[in-house]
Image (cartoon, rainbow, N blue to C red):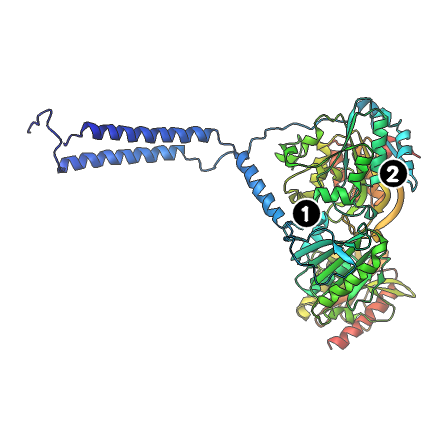
Amino acid sequence: MSKRPKDQPPQPGMNRRDFLVRSAKAGITLGAATALACFLYDPYGPAAPVEKSSVALPDFSVPEAGKKIAIATGDDRIETVNAALKALGGIERFVKKGDRVLIKVNAAFATPPSLCATTNPELLAEVTRLCLAAGATVVAVTDNPINNPESCFALTGIGEAAQSSGAKLILPGESLFTNITVPGSNLIRNWPVLSGAFHGATKLIGIAPVEDHHRSGASMSMKNWYGFIGGRRNIFHQDIHTFIKDLALMIKPTLVILDGTFAMVSNGPTGGSVSDLKRTDTMIVSTDQVAADACGAALLGKTAADLPFIAKAEQAGAGTSDFESLGPFRV
Amino acid sequence: MRRTGVAETCIGIFILALLAATAGGIYFIQSLYDPELYRVAAQKQEDAAGRRNLLPPSDTSPLPAYLPENLIPLGLEETFDPETLSDKIDGKAELYLSSGFVKLSTRRFAAKADPKSWLELFIYEMGDPTNAFSVYSVQKRKDSRPVDLGVSAYATQDALFFVSGPRYFEIISASPDISAEMTALAKNLVKAEPAHAGQQAESSLFPPESLDESSISLHMSDVFGFSGLDRVYTAGYGTQKGQVTAFISRRKDPEEAAGLAAAYGRFLIENGGTEAGRIDDAPDSKIYKVFDTYEVVLHRGQFFAGAHEADNLESATEIASRIYRKLGEAAP
């Protein structure tokens, strides 16, 4: 074996031995890299999105008021809503001085008030007035409509009614939505909800019309909370009864006001003509949203058993479908 | 073995260190991966895609040719496809989607004399005249009155509904003051449509005596609660003996019509019905008593037909017999 001087510069070219040694090193390197890659490879990808906010929205109910329902009959919404509230002990029982009240209307469609597909503006104005008279410092009105929000609030008359009665209108801007997961919910999991509208609110009142609904059979108090949902929410129509139950779990209102002065008995929820309406002259006010809807079903010629979401909401603990058990105040 | 030079070694070490740093960086970033960030981005893209359909055409778009002189546009046209239809009509979208819906165009117009009086026009493209007639007929309002537009049409106190070829139209007004403009708009729309031959052949097979023509409807699926029953025309009859709903459906061939009659009969029995004989002059018929009502199911040629939920046996058999004879004339 020949010895090379220590400081001898590298020789050009490569002999057979060098080639074999270097090939072996390259092979070992490639093998090690491949083994490392195999070790780090995750065939299942990242885990499901982390549920950042698996928390409930605030509970707006008034426990000391208990579970109650009032059913007022008459053709004048102003009179019937006042009569129903009086039967429950007055608005002061629910709205105290300094409260900040959020009113969730149904402004889903940019249609005229005459079609009764949306919350009646005169009823909204009266409820706003009552809340302010009871000492509320702020009354805010909101919805995330199906159609363009500005058009909906303008053409339904809700925007003008809110402003003229002293309520603040909250438009569903993108920044107001955050992803939440409703405890116990099947479908509202890590989904955008209009939670920004709740900031600072101490009481929540839902005001909804009574409507036939092609998919769910009816749209009343519980379905009204659909307007708090963002994103491509139409996918929930595939399992609408479970979804309405989830909405009832998400929202614990102070009161729901179900306006059955007219009921949209056909072609709902949009209707399209006053011919779709039936005069039913009923105003239902309740602290139990399930009871309110069970009572409202009759205005559509249905029973609670015809609307599976009512039984689902009851089983989930959102209220009772046996509204008679609450001892309704009939006025 | 050939020895490497100092410079060569340094470059090699540098490259290896760079690769190691890159690998470490990837590992570190990966540990911070938040799928939600990507989900939100995807959601925004979806929303943007969804809202694209809502974008109106430019302000310079010409006025529609069908617009009467006494109306002015109140906003721009919006269009919706099957993906976005529910953005406009929410839960009622299912009705259209199950009937071949293609596109919806909507636009609001106001009276030139009083811009506070406005209406909204809905034009549903349903793919073919049968689909369009179906969505028109199943939504028909009970207290409506017929309107002479030269096509199937009716009006209510505040709206006008009609069908022309593959399109179904709704004109919904915000006040009754605008009804004249509504009618003018409807006439222009019908005029602008290409002529369509009478498409509803089955509807002419209902015997005319005591028929309520305005009640003729086309049901596309799950008819009478039976999932196997589709494309069925129904019509109301008010006989002296009672109210009856008659039905006719043209099937692919006589075998399919006979098979459907048998399947529907089984469905009635499974749901509490009992056989109650047949009509003497209609050999391919069966009578069923379902609780307090009577049902007659028959087939003749490629037609499946009968009477549904009749108040009494006499009215059910009378109407079914007349239909059976009429079908004989159509398909002897």
Q: Where B90 falls versus B144 (above or below)? A: above
Residue nearest the observer in this picture, B134 or A261:
A261
For mark 2, give the secondary structure.
strand
Point out residue A207 in the picture as x, y percentages from the top left corner: 80, 37
Residue at mark 2 to residue at mark 1: CA–CA distance:
29 Å
Amino acid beneath label 1: Asp
Mark 1 = which residue?
A: B87
Residue nearest the observer in this picture, B222 or A28:
A28
Q: Which quadrant is the C terminus of chain A positioned in?
A: top right
* Residue at the (44%, 35%) spot, across then down: A42
| Label ID, residue A283 | 2
Point out residue A209 in the picture as x, y percentages from the top left corner: 81, 42
| Label ID, residue B330 | none
Residue nearest the observer in this picture, A159 or B74:
B74
Point out residue A29 in the picture as x, y percentages from the top left corner: 28, 33
Q: Which quadrant is the N terminus of chain A positioned in?
A: top left
Q: Chain of mark 2?
A: A
Q: Residue furthest left?
A: A2
Q: Is residue B265 visible?
A: no
Q: Is residue B81 left or right of residue B1?
A: right
